[in-house]
Amino acid sequence: MPSLPRIMIVLWSVLLVLFQVLQSDQHAFGFAIQRSYLRRNLCPPRNEVLKRDSHRTSSFATVFAKDGVLYRQSVCTKDEMESIQQELPGAMKSLTQEQSSIAQHRFGASISKQPGSAILDILERGSIYSLVQRAVISSLVDSSPKIRLSQNIPVEVRLYQKPGASMAWHQDDILYDPPQIEIVFTVENTSDCATLWKVEHGLHSQETHPNSLLMLQAGGPEHCVTSLRRGRRVILKCAYIMEGATFLGGENYKYQFGESKTTSGSQKKKKKR
């Protein structure tokens, strides 16, 4: 018959083995829970991702349909921003001070609509186009129409740098039927300017960040840009229209945009807002 000390040693060894097994099971169980949590939260099923993206799209489309204005950040990819920044200096060589009744001390120039322009490519097929398309079309009952960059209205670069550069309160004139969507894309902003707009629920103020987009429905919210005291702000300005939209032109055109040609010929108009 084994002695008592030997029995105690055997029992102790068995308990030690059991304890190690339990610890291992707990660790494996905990790891399984953690792995399951990460898989569920960091790598959700594709249908859940699509559902979230659809919700985001419908949310900002609803805001634009209701208020006629939408501000979004981080719009373009890194490559798109680099392409815009590389091309802009050439266009900015022809900057001239605008002679507008509502824009003070602001400079602008048209972007040449030549094949190979990275800026035009981004506006016609890139991230800016995609965002505007989703916001506008998702807010319509009939989602079949598409938008396109207006050929009547120039793509422009605008510079706020001179002290006092600003834009007074105004509402964008309607140049198309249905009304165009006007776009302000901020390329650079080290200024203290703020863009303000009025909506049903109050006054909104925003210092627009680089790589941000402000969409405005023509004939929609009143807006302005406060007077610059320091820094500078560089923006791209363009307009999108619904396919099949009718260009109205008329006297409003000369107040809305800078010198440019209409699609029908060489008639030149005057300066914009």
Image: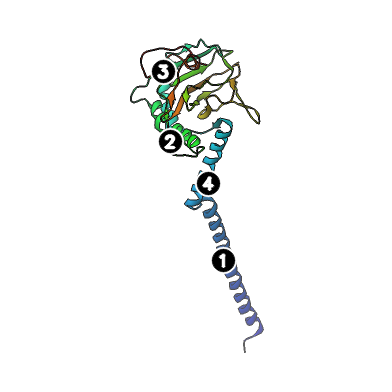
Q: Earlier in the sequence, mark 2 or mark 1?
A: 1
Question: In this figure, which residue is indicated by the disc labeled 1?
Answer: 24
Closer mark to the observer between disc 3 and disc 2: 2
Which x, y percent locates residue 108? 47, 15
Give the mark nearer the N terminus: 3 vs 1: 1
The residue lying at 55 percent from left, 34 percent from top is: 65
Label 3 and label 2: CA atoms lie apart by: 32 Å
Answer with mark 3 or mark 2, whichever residue precedes in sequence. Answer: 3
Q: Distance between the residues labelled 3 and 1?
A: 67 Å
Q: In this view, does 130 lie above or below 194?
A: below
Tell me the tag on residue 91: 3
Q: Which callout, 4 or 1, points at the residue further toward the start of the chain?
A: 1
Considering the numbered disc 1 on the image, is that residue within a helix, a strand or a loop? helix
Residue type, numbered disc 4: Arg
Amino acid residing under circle 1: Ser
| Residue nearer the viewer, 268 or 193 | 268
Reading the image, the residue beneath label 2 is: 145
**Amino acid type assigned to the residue bearing label 2 in the image:** Pro
Q: Name the residue carrying label 4.
A: 52
User: Are there few (<14), some (14-19), or many (20+) residues within 10 Å of tag 2?
Assistant: few
- The reply to whether dot 3 and dot 1 touch (C-beta < 8 Å) is no
Please give the name of the residue rendered at 43% of the width and 36% of the height, measured from the top-left corner: 145
Front-most of residues 99 and 181: 181
